[in-house]
Image: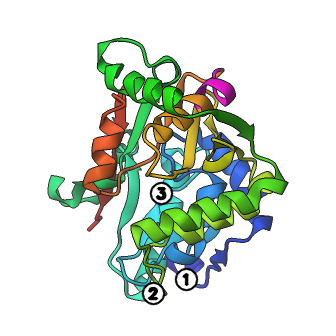
Amino acid sequence: MTGVHSNMEFSEITLNSKHLFDQYMKKHKPRISELTFTNFFAWRYYYRFRYAVISDLLCVIAAPAKKQPFAMMPIGDVNERNFEEAYNAIRSYFAEKGWKLCFGRVTRDELAYFRDKVADESSIVYDRDNSDYLYNTRDLAELKGKKYDGKRNHINRFMREHTFEYVPLECGLLDECARIMEEWCRDKDCSCQDGDYCERNANLEILRHFKTLGCKGALIKVDGEFAAFTMGEMLNEDTAVIHIEKARSSINGLYTVINQQFVQREWSSTAYINREQDLGLEGMRKAKLSYHPVTLVEKFNVYPV
């Protein structure tokens, strides 16, 4: 088996890879936010993704410049037989590169495939910082009940102090989104040196290609000026994923307004909203918890022997 796969070609991701990725992800019924072509494409330079189809499974490997390489769980209609073949090919590839074998972003359900491949439980590490926040769509759209009192207060204050307009994203508004993104970056002092985790660059990639990527977006005009934008897409049959949400932080309640408006107007037919991970950032964790997720979609790193 090892010999068969030793010269396996892993390819770089381009826009032309979308059809192939979509085909395999549809079979996989993804629950984690990473499993959209949008995320693979937007982050392809940072993670230096490569992919190959092995035993009718899509295998993706990440080799970021400043972090440990890892493989994703093979994507598609996974069973024990094809998983074993894909696993052995990935293992050979890592060995050739001289890398320690690691599978990242593995869900709890998928851990079963690795049980006979790890020495003990210490080889399976919970990745809290990358676990996704999953919300009931109705909760985010309605913000009902005592637990959302603070959110409703933010919105009421915003409505008293400002006029606003919700504008669906069209190609002619991409420059406005880019301007909001740059403004956000100046506030946050984005670091976008080579090899850095650069949200700005990834988001600009999504903006440039949002129609081809199949994303929907919206902007909020506050007192006549565009001040926030957001983008998302369907993750699976009943769940939407929100990829980007940026707003002028000096306008109180604007994040709360765009969050609610986008869900109400674009995603009311879904059951759940995945708002991705918090990356271990304290402010983001607090903000995401404050919307009361129904669950965290847990992810694990697996280090086989």
Q: Give the secondary structure at mark 3.
A: helix
Quadrant in the rendering for residue 190: bottom left
**Percent from the top left, x then y, of residue 281?**
29, 57
Q: Which residue is mark 1?
A: 6
**Percent from the top left, x then y, of residue 38?**
65, 56
Question: Mark 2, residues whose alpha carbon is within 10 Å: few (<14), some, or many (≥20)?
Answer: few
The amino acid sitting under disc 3 is Glu
Q: Give the secondary structure at mark 1.
A: loop
Question: Mark 3, residues whose alpha carbon is within 10 Å: few (<14), some, or many (≥20)?
Answer: some
Q: Give the distance between the C-alpha atoms of the residues marked 3 and 2, in whole angstroms.
A: 18 Å
Q: Are marks 2 and 1 in contact (CB under 8 Å)?
A: yes
Q: Is residue 110 left or right of residue 225?
A: left
> Mark 3 or mark 2: which is in front?
2
The amino acid sitting under disc 2 is Glu
Q: Is residue 59 left or right of residue 288?
A: right
Q: Which residue is mark 2?
A: 96
- Look at the picture and state if 286 lies above or below 248: above
Residue 179 in the magenta stretch? The answer is no
Counting residues from the N terminus, which is met first, the one under dot 2 or under dot 1?
1
Q: Which residues are magenta?
A: 263-268
Q: Which residue is mark 3?
A: 84
> Mark 2 or mark 1: which is in front?
2
Q: Which mark is residue 117?
A: none
Name which residue lies at 33% across and 42% down: 287
**Percent from the top left, x then y, of residue 305?**
26, 68
Q: Give the distance between the C-alpha atoms of the residues marked 1 and 3, in whole angstroms.
A: 16 Å
